[in-house]
Amino acid sequence: MIFSIEDDAPIVRDLLPDWRARFGAAGGRLELEIGCGHGGFALGFARAFPDRALVGIEQRRKFAAELAAKGARRGLPNLLVLNGDARLLAPRLFAAGSLAAIHVHFPDPWWKRRHHRRRLVDDRMSALLLGLLAPGGVLDFRTDVERYAREAVVRLEEAGFRNAAGPGRFAEAAPDEIPSTRERRYLASGEPVWRLRLLK
């Protein structure tokens, strides 16, 4: 057994799990969401794409446990939610070049200089994300903070990502895009969401 449950929070036991054994055929197209929050994207994705597998990593234990329970109640075998720090877990979970897509939606921008090391988009994390993606794989990044988006596009392009919209440009929402819980509020109010669709 690769995963066990302790106090309702899934815990990783092995390095580089056999994802095909865990997900079956859906494990052939493996995607990662970092920071699932309340799970609007993860649940919508798993329902809309039963032929794909999504692993969600959420640092807040309560949110991870609640989302895992929702996925189980809704009968979504292609969704697995883990509690932990993606910086530490992702290299343990996924071999280089093994992910079809990585989704990072509305990460905390951590404005204070002493907190910059916590940002998901820094040089080290950018290189990690690029390395985990398969050739042609997609980094789906969304934020409601324009300044963070503009900093992120520069950093990620410098790390080696190719911008599908063109250098320094932001992406339009795709017709089949799954919104996160937070993004639904912005869509309803008309507030802008800054999107990047970056390719390896």
Image (tube, rainbow, N blue to C red):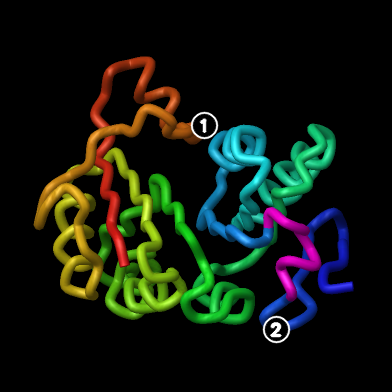
Rendering quarter of residue 142: top left
Q: Can see residue 152?
A: yes
Secondary structure of the residue carrying numbered label 2? loop
The residue at 79%/78% (across/down) is 13
Residue 75 within the segment the image draws in magenta: no
Horizontal and vertical percent for residue 102? 46, 58
Residue 20 within the segment the image draws in magenta: yes
The residue at 30%/61% (across/down) is 199
- Give the residue type at disc 2: Leu
Query: In the image shown, does 106 or 175 lie closer to the viewer?
Result: 175
Relative to residue 112, is residue 179 depicted above or below? above
Magenta stretch bounds: 18-26
Query: In the image shown, does 144 or 153 lie closer to the viewer?
Result: 153
Q: CA distance from mark 1 to mark 2?
A: 31 Å
Q: In this rendering, would 41 be left or right of 23?
A: left
Q: In this rendering, would 58 be left or right of 131?
A: right
User: Residue 15 shows which numbered tag?
Assistant: 2
The residue at 58%/39% (across/down) is 45
Rendering quarter of residue 43: top right
The residue at 22%/74% (across/down) is 160
Magenta span dominant secondary structure: helix
Query: In the image shown, does 31 or 189 lie closer to the viewer?
Result: 31
Horizontal and vertical percent for residue 89? 60, 74
- Label 1 or label 2, whichever comes before in sequence order: 2
Q: Can see residue 59?
A: no
Location of the C terminus by quadrant is bottom left
Q: Residues within 10 Å of mark 2 (few under 14, many from 20)?
A: few
Secondary structure of the residue carrying numbered label 1? helix
- Give the residue type at disc 1: Thr
Residue on which the image places disc 1: 181
Location of the N terminus by quadrant is bottom right
